[in-house]
Amino acid sequence: MEFLNGKGNRNGKRVVSALLVLSFLVAVPALQGGSGDPLGGSYVLATTAKDKKNEAEQGLSDVEDDIRDIEGQQSQINNQISSQEQKLDALLKQQDALNVQIGETQARADQANLDLAAAEEKRDEEYESMKLRIQFMYENNTDDSIWSAIFNSNGFSDMLNRIEYIADVYQSDRELMDAYEQSVKEVEDLTIQLAAEMDELYGLQESYLGQQAQIEELLSSLAAQSQKYAEQLAEAQQRAESYRKTIAEQEEIIRQQQIAEAEARRRQQEEAARAQAQANANANNNTNTNTGTSSDPAFTSSVSGQELVSYALQFVGNPYVWGGNSLTKGCDCSGFVHLVYEHFGFSTPRYSLSFASVGQPVSRENIKAGDIVVYSPKNGVGHVAIYIGNGCIVEAQDVGVGITSNRSVDCRSIMAIRRLL
């Protein structure tokens, strides 16, 4: 069957529900025939649906508790992820700054090495120049030699002046060499210092990379936990949706059962009313036959039949709704008569055949505007209307035409005519 498969699943459920209700309605007469509760079978069905609904509601409550727990745990994990991501972001910024510092320090170290090489080269050049100068002074220029100063001097004073000049040259060379050595030493110290700074920076960089690896490993673990909770949450939400669907289905079954129960009670009450009305009609016919008179009781109410008919006619054209209780939004035949009379303060039954026992009996030839016309059941369904005069009635006719006033009072077999005014 198509309604049990695929796209027809929803329609299938409606059909199954309708079949359940129909099977219940068919079973009602048999149930009524027994000595027990005429609605006993429906009660069993309703109880089963209510039990299933209660079980689903309890299951839904438990699942919703699980969902709240999972969401709480997932929130904690997500907070931890957010915290670790902030730490990682700060660490990456520190690494960026460190990389800039490493680059700058490396550039200074490279420049220091270049400066050291230049200083050493300059020192070595001056050293070679000094050696050549000294060699020249001692070997090639006797005028500048010590012996020349001693033997060629023009006296002791001149000798001392010559020796002092030679000493000044030596002193100047010594100071110059010392300065070059000091410059080389300072540059060497700077390169050593920068090398130490580079070692420290590379050590800090290694530490940062280790921290980054730890944070990324922790984030991976937290992400796995978050994914697990997300899967658990999706599964729990799916179960919750399944419970909600079950609850809705059972509520629909309960509603259909309540409709069936109401219909069974209505049929039972109409059957009783029909039997009573038939008995009353038979009694009235016997009385009229025996006395030779026609029933035409006097009006005892301050409300005239025409006044009641005028009020009823204003609702012509409104819809027919089985079991409805609104003259504007919709009602059925007995509801229409009940609501019209209720407007004028009269209390009447709510089922069509029950009207056969209200007020006083009226014979067909004495019917007047405002009288209630009760019709014999047709296919097991009774009907009731209000006579408006000129051989017509106002009634909630059926779903197709709603409330009308154009049918003859003799459109169906009359069971009873009653005067309530």
Image (spheres, rainbow, N blue to C red):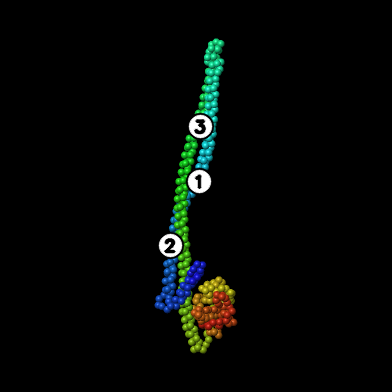
- Quadrant that contains the C terminus: bottom right
Query: Of the numbered discs in the image, which one, if any, rests on residue 59?
Result: 2
Mark found first going from the N terminus, 1 or 3: 1
Q: Secondary structure at mark 1?
A: helix
Q: Which circle's residue, 2 or 1, is located before the other in the chain?
A: 2
Q: Residue at x 48, y 49 (%)?
A: 82
Circle number at residue 215 = none
The reply to whether dot 1 and dot 3 touch (C-beta < 8 Å) is: no
Mark 3 Cα-neighbour bin, 10 Å: few <14, some 14–19, many ≥20: some
Q: Marks 1 and 3, how far apart in space?
A: 35 Å
Tell me if residue 346 comes above or below residue 55 in the rendering: below
Q: Residues within 10 Å of mark 1 (few under 14, many from 20)?
A: few
Q: Nearer the viewer, residue 94 or 149?
A: 149
Q: Is residue 374 above or below residue 88?
A: below
State the residue lying farthest toward the left: 35
Give the amino acid type for the residue marked by disc 2 in the picture.
Gly
Q: CA distance from mark 2 to mark 1?
A: 44 Å
Q: Which residue is mark 1?
A: 89
Circle 2 Cα neighbour tier, 10 Å, few/some/many (<14 / 14–19 / ≥20)? some
Residue furthest toward the top? Answer: 155
Q: Which residue is mark 3?
A: 190
Q: Secondary structure at mark 3?
A: helix
Looking at the rendered image, the disc whose residue lies closer to the viewer, 2 or 3, is 3
> Residue at image x 53%, y 84%?
363
Disc 3 residue type? Leu
Along the polypeptide, which appears first: circle 2 or circle 3? 2
Q: Secondary structure at mark 2?
A: helix
Q: Residue 55, percent across and down?
A: 42, 64
